[in-house]
Each structure stands twice: as structure tokens, then as C-alpha cells.
Image (tube, coloured by chain):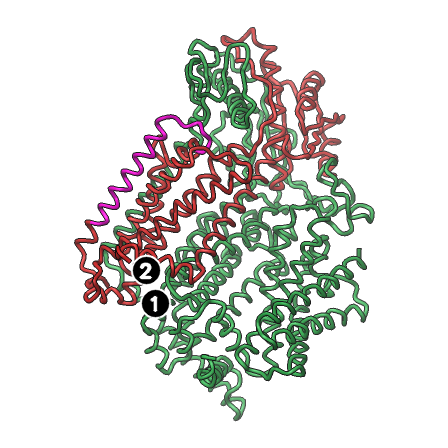
Chain colours: A green, B red
């Protein structure tokens, strides 16, 4: 009710922003030449405004920092880095003296226990110990702690023996086995049962026993090349003993002609081929992407902290009012304020990419993540009521985005899943692979579009009545959605615009659930997909009804529902890009995308079915949204139910 | 009402409740913990041959005597199975066709050593699983070979006790998960104080202190109390949740003291930073760096907080760990006193 007075302002403000954002396209109505030149001058004016605001943002930010603070910060950062480096170098033991071992100081095992950092030797008389070691046997209590202590003791003896042997004069007797370990590339790997056409029809062969490689006729394009050059990466990765590695030209260390080396980057970063005694083999750290994620994403967290503060600062004490009344479009203000931070992010990314040896592709893959970081922080800062709330919003943003980019990249060997994350592109770029344009678009596209849509939403509430009022985040969100709605057609547009978010959410669900057996994940994915899609189709309708944008009649509800379904359907068709990367060939991918008619040989009926589904469920929720909050929730549950049933039918029909 | 400090603390908590941020904070912590557990369960099951029902097939080729020993070693390892192939080419073909996961070619080299050329797939997670298992088998082979050559050795290696089944997640739970759940609330608490103070400065509400019957130090105390008090409560709640989940947590009172001491240090740091550099951007940056310094610096100490927390929770800590907690609490008190000195030397209306 309190919103009522601002209603008119709402629509006028909205009208003006809408005009501004489309101004470039729809202004001049005279001759074509005049239109072009008019367009050019307008564009130049926009750019000038943006540049001016960016400059102002930089100088103002620089003004808040005095030299002392900068020096303090720099020194602190340097010391922290130095300490961290020292800690890594000296190997800080977080598990130091974790278990106490009762042992006589005459025991043959005493030295082994004493030299182990995890174990703490205690005299036999001490009752407070986990295990007791005598020369003939080890007594272990029936507790988990005691068993873990025994395990640690066994490892301590093993490494003690290694050290003893290293001092032996006769090294060939001390280390009678020399191993040369090489990594070799094979074709793409997909777990058994998770490929739709895998095996012989029955996609349920996940049973534990057999070997994970499936063996059967899954894609063969094998490329028999050595992943990375051995000599460079081998020595620095692990401080290996490297005793008698005389035989370098071993049987199969052949020409390292370049080929597809999917995770080759990993072997390069973390000590690839090794040779020496078996103990010196250090298995490659499987999560190269973890390191990459941290290298690229951690600096972004610092940038968004500053960016969020800057945006929220505009909203404190109506500081941003002066800018708002200036003859500058809100879009230009936002662009200008964002530009310096984006530039900073790009700079940092370029430096990091150069440091780890990535090319332009790596930078191009990471920048969209940075944009999404910035755009969600922008929206968060537009919604947050206080600095505290902003902190939690930024933390949520970074946790979510880190998960989104990191989890799929773990499965770098299962290409369609891994491509969800742009970090996979970086890993591949480091490995020197060419990246098909389709793969690149699949990985980066949703993120880029989502970032742009978020900026659009945030700019919609970059106006007086939203910036300087204290309203809860959900209400602000509804405001932001509503600000993009002017006529029924906008509902369809918004539905279509929600596609990248739907896509991101569904992909995240697939990536997270990928490790579970297919029997469990397919229903889970179906439900997740239904929830995400129904929310995406109905939230803006609810927002519009709440803001009294449309009459609350059945006819209007049905119209809006139909439009929303149509918009969503059309938007979804663009996601046909998933076909390019072969995601539908995975069972999970099929479960998520087949119900919308992607990746299946579509009969005419199947083409229309998704449209009907979306229109029906959206109408159901629209009818609910008409009646208010609780009715909306109820209708949403119903729509999700319909959607799940439909999805099940389609997947069953296909399977 | 009584003490104005308590009133301010209550107001702080009230605003947290109103904005429902505390729910978000708890959700984030839960997510981080769940996420790291997810990672580690995945990681550990790779490193531990018994943890996953995943068999690695190894193709073995090469000179006869070495091959027999190698096969014995491979078959002695759980999760590994060896197959002999007549030639390296045949083995490599089997490898490419994915009939086997690794190839080991054995030959007798100089000085009677066994030379092995091992080929593992370069495919991320699978590589680690294969290599870890292969390494265990090869170490077993090394032990047998070494025993056969014991005449040429000056010292005999200690006999290795037999392997047993032990939970591979055990050590992780105490050395990573428990400290994470204990210290995350502390970090968030400091950040809260920074936000709260810089916001007062940004909104200019500290001006009101001139007419209000509260002192600036009471305001700071109230905020420190609200944020810092929340941290140990959250931490202990996590510990009880872990207990419910079947993970034994000992010394809960000592852990509480430890988190309280650490919270005092970190929250004082946050407050000091935001008083000296009241712009939120700078303050948050400096605070983050400062916290990094605190955690990195203490990790170099022999009784670092992570290790102490792990040993306390595990119940294997001696007197030294308890003394470390007492020491930490003393440091916390000292930083609170230091904060008071800083606050007293500052005119809130000069902050900008």
C-alpha cells in the first residue's frame, strides 16, 4: 500500500530508462544518413559521460586513501605472502603431535616415532596414549583415534625406513627398484552407464565391481602422445630422490608431437613424469583447477569488495542524488562506475594468465567470470540495506561462483561436464589445445549473458525511490523485476532473459550431482530442473501483480502465463548450443535438456509439447500469483509437480 | 536497560536478525564445510585404495624374473590386478583400448636393479587413483627386493607392521574440518565489526554521540561484544552438530575459550582498522590482510591454533595445548585493552 504513491514515478522513471537503453536504436526518424550520424553523436556523448564518471570514480577512490594506508597495506600483504611462502616451504604441520605413542626409548621403533611430526613419543608409564609400541607388537585400543594413530605409526615407520636406506653406501641394494613414470593421453573418458548410448541399451550398469573405464565401444579417438614434455616439469614439482635415473631414452618416450592433451596442463604444473625409487613417486595433484580457481578468483573477491562498497556508498546519505539529477542516463553512471573495477580485474587477470603461461584464450575465458562477479555484486549492493548485509551478499556471490566454476572443472576428463566451467578452457589453453568455438560459447555464453542481464536488472533500480529507501532484499528484487515490465510483452522478454540463469542453475545441478549413481541423479535433476524453470517463469509475473502493474483478472493471468511460457520456450531454443558440445549424450544432460526438446529427433508433436507445457505451468502460477503470496506459493508447487511429471514422461519415453 | 554497552550489543544483534543476514551467514558456513568435505571425501577415496571399490588393472610385460616379483606385489595390493602381456606393444595397445589402466614394463638393469617403466593415463582424477595404487604395489616390491639384498646393507629396515582398515577421513575431520568450523565464525565476526563501524562513519551517525548519553567507547564495546560474542557460540554449535553426527569432540570448554580468545584478537583488529581507516573499502581490505597475517603468523608457531584445536577436539592434547589456549585468551584481553586505548585517543567526530 505504501508503494501506491510511488507508482506513477515508477512508470515514468522506467519509461525514461527504457528509452535511454534503446535510444541508440530507435531515435532518428529522418534519412538513413542522418540516423547514422545522429547515432554516432549519441554514442559519443554516452562514451564521454561514461569516461568522465570512470575518471571521477578513480580520482575519488584515490582520494580516500592516504599514502600511509597504502604503505601499511602493502607491507602487510608482503609480510603475509612471505609468511605464507615460508609456511609452505617449511611445511607447517597442522597435524603435529596429533597422536601420543607409548614407547620405550630403547625400542628399535623409537627413532621412527620421534622423527615423525604426527606422533609424539611418551614413556611407557604414561596412561594417556593412543597406542603402545613394543619391539614385538603394537597394542591398539578399540577406538577410532587409536586406529588412526596406528595408521600414522605405520606410515612413520615406512618413511623412516626410506630415510635409513638413503644413507646406505650400497644404493643399488637399498633401492633395488627404479621406476620411470610417464603419463599418456587416451581418448575422452566417460564413466560407465552415464553415456546414453553406452553399453548395450540398459543404462543401469553402474554396479560397483567392474573397472571404471567401461571398456566397451565408447568414443575411441585416441591420441597416443606424451602429455607434456618430461624434463622441465619433473624436477621442480616434487623434491624427489631422483637416484638412478640413468635410462632416459626409455622404450616409449617417443616424439611429443602435440595433440589433444586434456589435463596435460596438470602434469606440467605439478611435476609430471618422474623417475626414481617407488617412494619418490608423487601422484599428480588432481585438482589443477583448484589452484587455477584460487589464482584467478581470489583477487576478484578483493575487487568486488571495493566495488560493492563504492556502489553502496552512493546510496548512503543520498550521496548519489547529485549524479542522478545530472543529465546522465543511469546506464552511463553504472557503466562509468563499473569501468575502473572491470579494468582492474582485466589487468589482474592478464598478469595472472601471463604468470601461469596462459594466452588470450585464458583471459577471454576468465573475464566473463569477472563480469558476473561484478554484476552480481552490483545487484547485491543495490539491494543491500547495510554494509553488513552487503558483506554477506558478496560472500554468497563468491562462494556460489567459485563452486560454479570449480566443481565442473574437477571432471576435466569428462569433457561435456567440465566445459560448464570456463576454467576448463584455461586448463586446455595451458595444455596448448585449440578450443572449438562451440565449446567456448557453451562455456562462456551463459555467464556473459547472465552478467549483462544482472546489470540490466540493477540499472532498473538505479533510481531515487529504490536507491535511498530501506526495503528488504526480496522486495527490492521484485522492484527490479517490475522495473523491466511495462506491458504484457515484457513478461515474455523477461522469461527469455531468465534463460541464462536457468541454464547456469541446471548446469550446476548436473555438475554437482554427476558423481552420484545415475539412478539417483536423474530424478533429482528432473526435480531441480522443474523448480528452477517454474521459478524463472513466474517470479516476474508475481512481481508485476504485486506492484499492480496489471489487472488481477483470470483473463490477464492466462495471457501473462501464456506469454511467459512462449518467451521461455523461444529463449530455450537458443540453448540448442548444448548440442554442439555433446552434453545431451550424457544421461544427466538428457534428463535436463530433453524435456525441452533439445537433442532428440523431434517429431512435430514433441516440438510443440514443451511450448504447451511452459504455457500451462506458467498460467497455473500466474493464476496463483494473482491472489497473493500464499496462493502463488501453492500454485508454484502445483506447477512444479506438473513439470516433474512431464519431464519423467519424456525421459521415460526416450529411455 | 542498565548498561549502555549491552543495549548497543542488543541493537546490533537485532539488526542482524532483522536483515536475516545471520541465517545467510550460517548457510554459507554450512555450505563451505559441506563443500570441503565433498572435496575431501572425493580426494581421500582416491588416495586410499580400500576406500573406493575401484579396481585398477595393470598390464605387466618384460623380463621374466622381475615380472614374477612384480605380479606378486601387484596382486598383494588391494584394488590392483595384474595381467601379463607378451610384449610392450601388446600392453600399450591394451592400454589405448582401455582394457588396462596402466602399463609396467620390467627389465633387469645395471647392478642387478629392477628397472620399471610405468605408464599411467593422463586424465586427471583417474591418474591419481592409478598412480597411488601403483606406488603402493611398487613399494611392496621394493621391500621384498630389498630383503633379498639385505646382505649388502649395513642396517636392516624396520619390519613394517601390517596394514589395517582405518577411516581415511579421520585425520581430515580433525585437522581441517574442525578448525574450519571453529575459525570461520571468527573471521565473519571481525568483518561484521568493520561493516558496523564504517557504516556509522559513512552515515554520520556518530555525530549524535555529542548529545547522546553514551560514549564512543561504549558504542565500540557494544559492537565488539555483539560480533565477538556470536563467534564462540556459533563455533560451539558446530561442535555439537558434529557430535550429533557421530564425530567425537572432546574439550568443548577449552575450544570455546580458544575461539573466544581468537575472536577477541580478530574483532579488536577489525575495530582498530575501521577506526584508523574508516572508508569501508580500505578497512575491509586492511582487515582481510590483517587476518591473513594473524592466521599465517600463528601457523608458524609450534602451538598454532589449527593444530591446537585439532588436538583438543581429538582429546590427545596435553598441558601445552591448554596453556596455549590460556595464552591466546591473554592475547585477546591485551588486544581488547589496546583497542580501548585506540578508541580513547580518537574523537569520533573527526573520523571521516
Residue at image position (60%, 41%) is B124
List the single residue furthest toward the bottom.
A30
Q: Work out whether residue B274 can be spotted.
A: yes
Q: Work out whether residue A245 can be spotted.
A: no
Residue A133 in percent (x, y) is at: 50, 15
List the single residue furthest toward the front.
B1
Q: Viewed as shown, does residue B231 lie left or right of B216?
A: right
Q: Viewed as shown, does residue A54 lie left or right of A535?
A: left
Residue that numbered label 1 is attached to: A313
Give the SS element for disc 2: helix
Q: Is residue A393 above or below residue B55?
A: below
Residue A85 in percent (x, y) is at: 38, 39
Residue B323 in percent (x, y) is at: 32, 30
Q: Which residues are magenta?
A: B313-340
Q: Is residue B212 above or below residue B134?
A: below
Q: Main secondary structure of the magenta part?
A: helix
Return the chain for callout 2: B
Residue at image position (46%, 39%) is B178
Q: Is residue A37 above or below residue A615?
A: below
Residue A490 in percent (x, y) is at: 58, 79
Return the chain for callout 1: A
> Magenta span has B330?
yes
User: Could you say which disc has been placed on residue A451 in the image?
Assistant: none
Residue density around tag 2, few if under 14, some if 14–19, many if 20 or more, within 10 Å: many
Do labels 2 and 1 touch, CB within 8 Å? Answer: yes
Q: For the C terminus of chain A, give its image quadrant.
A: bottom right
In depth, the one of B219 and A533 nearer the eye is B219
Q: Quadrant of residue A70?
A: bottom left
In depth, the one of A325 and B185 nearer the eye is B185
Residue that numbered label 2 is attached to: B280
- Label 2 and label 1: CA atoms lie apart by 9 Å
Amino acid at each position: 500500500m505504501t508503494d501506491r504513491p510511488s507508482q506513477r514515478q515508477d512508470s515514468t522513471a522506467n519509461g525514461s530508462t527504457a528509452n535511454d537503453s534503446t535510444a541508440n536504436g530507435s531515435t532518428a526518424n529522418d534519412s538513413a544518413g542522418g540516423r547514422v550520424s545522429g547515432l554516432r553523436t549519441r554514442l559519443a556523448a554516452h562514451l564521454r559521460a561514461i569516461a568522465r564518471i570512470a575518471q571521477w570514480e578513480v580520482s575519488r577512490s584515490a582520494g580516500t586513501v592516504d599514502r600511509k594506508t597504502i604503505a601499511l597495506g602493502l607491507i602487510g600483504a608482503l609480510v603475509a605472502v612471505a609468511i605464507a611462502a615460508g609456511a609452505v616451504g617449511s611445511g607447517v604441520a597442522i597435524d603435529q603431535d596429533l597422536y601420543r605413542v607409548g614407547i620405550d626409548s630403547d625400542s628399535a621403533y623409537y627413532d621412527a616415532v620421534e622423527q615423525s611430526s604426527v606422533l609424539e613419543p611418551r614413556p611407557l608409564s604414561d596412561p594417556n596414549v593412543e597406542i603402545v609400541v613394543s619391539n614385538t607388537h603394537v597394542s591398539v585400543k578399540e577406538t577410532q583415534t587409536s586406529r588412526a594413530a596406528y595408521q600414522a605409526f605405520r606410515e612413520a615407520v615406512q618413511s623412516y625406513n626410506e630415510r635409513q636406506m638413503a644413507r646406505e653406501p650400497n644404493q643399488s641394494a637399498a633401492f633395488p627398484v627404479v621406476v620411470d613414470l610417464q603419463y599418456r593421453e587416451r581418448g575422452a573418458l566417460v564413466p560407465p552407464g552415464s553415456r546414453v548410448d553406452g553399453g548395450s541399451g540398459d543404462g543401469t550398469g553402474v554396479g560397483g565391481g567392474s573397472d571404471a573405464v567401461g571398456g566397451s565401444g565408447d568414443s575411441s579417438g585416441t591420441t597416443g602422445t606424451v602429455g607434456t614434455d618430461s624434463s622441465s616439469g619433473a624436477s621442480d614439482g616434487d623434491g624427489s630422490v631422483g637416484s638412478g635415473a640413468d635410462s632416459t631414452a626409455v622404450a616409449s618416450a617417443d616424439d611429443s608431437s602435440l595433440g589433444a592433451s586434456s589435463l596435460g596442463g596438470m602434469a606440467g604444473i605439478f611435476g609430471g613424469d618422474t623417475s626414481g625409487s617407488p617412494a619418490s613417486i608423487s601422484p599428480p595433484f588432481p585438482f589443477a583447477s583448484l589452484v587455477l580457481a584460487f589464482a584467478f578468483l581470489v583477487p576478484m573477491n578483493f575487487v568486488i569488495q571495493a566495488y560493492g562498497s563504492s556502489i553502496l556508498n552512493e546510496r548512503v546519505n543520498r550521496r548519489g542524488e547529485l549524479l542522478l539529477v545530472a543529465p546522465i542516463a543511469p546506464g552511463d553512471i553504472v557503466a562509468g562506475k563499473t569501468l575502473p573495477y572491470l579494468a582492474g580485474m582485466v589487468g589482474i587477470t592478464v598478469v595472472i594468465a601471463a604468470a601461469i603461461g596462459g594466452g588470450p584464450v585464458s583471459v577471454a575465458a576468465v573475464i566473463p567470470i569477472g563480469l558476473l562477479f561484478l554484476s552480481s555484486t552490483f545487484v547485491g549492493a543495490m539491494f543491500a540495506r547495510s554494509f553488513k548485509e552487503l558483506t554477506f551478499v558478496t560472500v554468497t556471490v563468491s562462494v556460489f561462483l567459485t563452486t560454479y566454476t570449480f566443481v565442473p572443472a574437477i571432471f576435466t576428463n569428462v569433457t561435456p561436464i567440465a566445459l560448464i566451467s570456463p576454467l576448463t578452457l584455461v586448463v586446455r589453453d595451458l595444455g596448448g589445445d585449440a578450443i572449438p568455438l562451440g565449446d567456448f560459447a557453451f562455456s562462456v555464453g551463459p555467464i556473459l549473458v547472465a552478467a549483462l542481464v544482472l546489470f540490466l536488472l540493477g540499472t532498473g533500480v538505479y533510481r531515487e525511490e529504490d536507491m535511498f529507501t530501506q526495503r528488504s532484499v526480496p522486495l527490492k528484487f521484485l522492484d527490479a523485476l517490475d522495473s523491466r515490465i511495462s506491458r504484457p510483452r515484457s513478461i515474455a522478454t523477461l522469461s527469455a532473459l531468465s534463460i541464462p540463469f536457468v541454464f547456469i542453475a541446471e548446469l550446476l545441478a548436473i555438475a554437482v550431482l554427476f558423481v552420484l549413481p545415475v539412478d539417483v541423479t536423474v530424478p533429482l535433476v528432473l526435480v531441480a530442473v522443474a523448480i528452477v524453470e517454474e521459478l524463472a517463469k513466474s517470479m516476474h509475473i508475481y512481481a508485476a501483480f504485486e506492484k499492480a502493474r496489471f489487472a488481477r483478472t483470470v483473463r490477464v493471468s492466462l495471457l501473462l502465463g501464456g506469454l511467459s511460457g512462449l518467451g521461455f520456450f523461444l529463449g530455450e531454443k537458443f540453448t540448442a548450443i548444448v548440442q554442439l558440445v555433446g552434453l545431451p549424450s550424457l544421461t544427466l544432460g538428457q534428463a535436463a535438456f530433453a524435456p525441452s526438446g533439445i537433442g532428440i529427433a523431434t517429431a512435430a508433436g514433441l516440438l510443440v509439447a514443451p511450448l504447451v507445457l511452459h504455457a500451462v505451468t506458467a498460467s497455473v502460477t500466474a493464476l496463483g500469483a494473482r491472489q497473493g503470496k500464499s496462493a502463488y506459493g501453492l500454485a508454484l508447487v502445483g506447477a512444479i509437480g506438473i513439470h516433474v511429471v512431464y519431464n519423467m514422461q519424456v525421459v521415460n519415453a526416450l529411455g | 536497560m542498565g548498561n549502555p554497552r549491552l543495549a548497543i550489543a542488543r541493537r546490533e544483534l537485532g539488526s542482524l536478525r532483522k536483515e536475516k543476514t545471520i541465517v545467510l551467514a550460517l548457510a554459507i558456513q554450512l555450505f563451505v564445510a559441506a563443500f570441503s568435505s565433498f572435496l575431501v571425501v572425493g580426494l581421500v577415496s582416491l588416495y586410499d585404495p580400500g576406500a573406493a571399490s575401484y579396481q585398477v588393472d595393470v598390464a605387466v610385460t618384460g623380463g621374466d624374473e622381475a615380472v614374477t616379483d612384480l605380479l606378486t606385489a601387484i596382486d598383494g595390493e588391494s584394488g590392483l590386478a595384474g595381467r601379463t602381456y607378451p610384449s610392450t606393444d601388446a600392453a600399450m595397445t591394451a592400454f589405448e583400448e582401455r582394457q588396462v589402466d596402466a602399463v609396467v614394463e620390467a627389465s633387469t638393469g645395471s647392478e642387478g636393479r629392477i628397472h620399471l617403466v610405468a605408464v599411467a593415463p593422463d586424465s586427471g582424477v583417474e591418474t591419481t587413483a592409478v598412480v597411488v595404487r601403483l606406488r603402493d604395489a611398487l613399494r611392496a616390491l621394493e621391500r621384498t627386493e630389498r630383503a633379498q639384498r639385505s646382505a649388502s646393507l649395513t642396517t636392516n629396515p624396520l619390519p613394517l607392521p601390517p596394514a589395517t582398515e582405518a577411516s581415511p577421513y579421520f585425520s581430515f575431520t580433525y585437522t581441517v574440518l574442525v578448525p574450519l568450523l571453529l575459525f570461520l565464525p571468527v573471521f565473519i565476526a571481525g568483518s561484521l565489526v568493520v561493516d558496523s563501524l564504517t557504516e556509522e562513519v559513512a552515515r554520520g551517525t556518530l555525530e549524535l554521540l555529542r548529545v547522546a548519553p553514551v560514549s564512543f567507547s561504549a558504542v565500540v564495546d557494544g559492537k565488539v561484544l555483539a560480533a565477538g560474542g556470536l563467534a564462540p557460540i556459533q563455533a560451539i554449535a558446530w561442535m555439537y552438530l558434529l557430535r550429533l553426527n557421530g564425530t567425537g569432540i572432546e574439550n568443548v570448554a577449552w575450544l570455546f575459550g580458544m575461539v573466544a580468545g581468537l575472536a577477541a584478537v580478530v574483532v579488536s583488529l577489525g575495530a582498530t582498522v575501521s577506526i584508523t581507516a574508516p572508508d569501508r573499502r580500505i578497512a575491509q581490505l586492511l582487515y582481510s590482510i590483517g587476518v591473513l597475517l594473524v592466521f599465517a603468523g600463528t601457523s608458524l608457531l609450534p602451538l598454532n591454533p589449527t593444530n591446537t584445536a585439532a588436538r583438543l577436539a581429538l582429546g590427545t592434547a596435553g598441558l601445552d595445548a591448554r596453556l596455549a589456549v590460556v595464552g591466546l585468551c591473554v592475547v585477546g584481553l591485551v588486544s581488547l585493552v589496546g583497542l580501548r586505548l585506540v578508541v580513547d585517543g580518537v574523537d569520533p567526530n573527526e573520523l571521516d
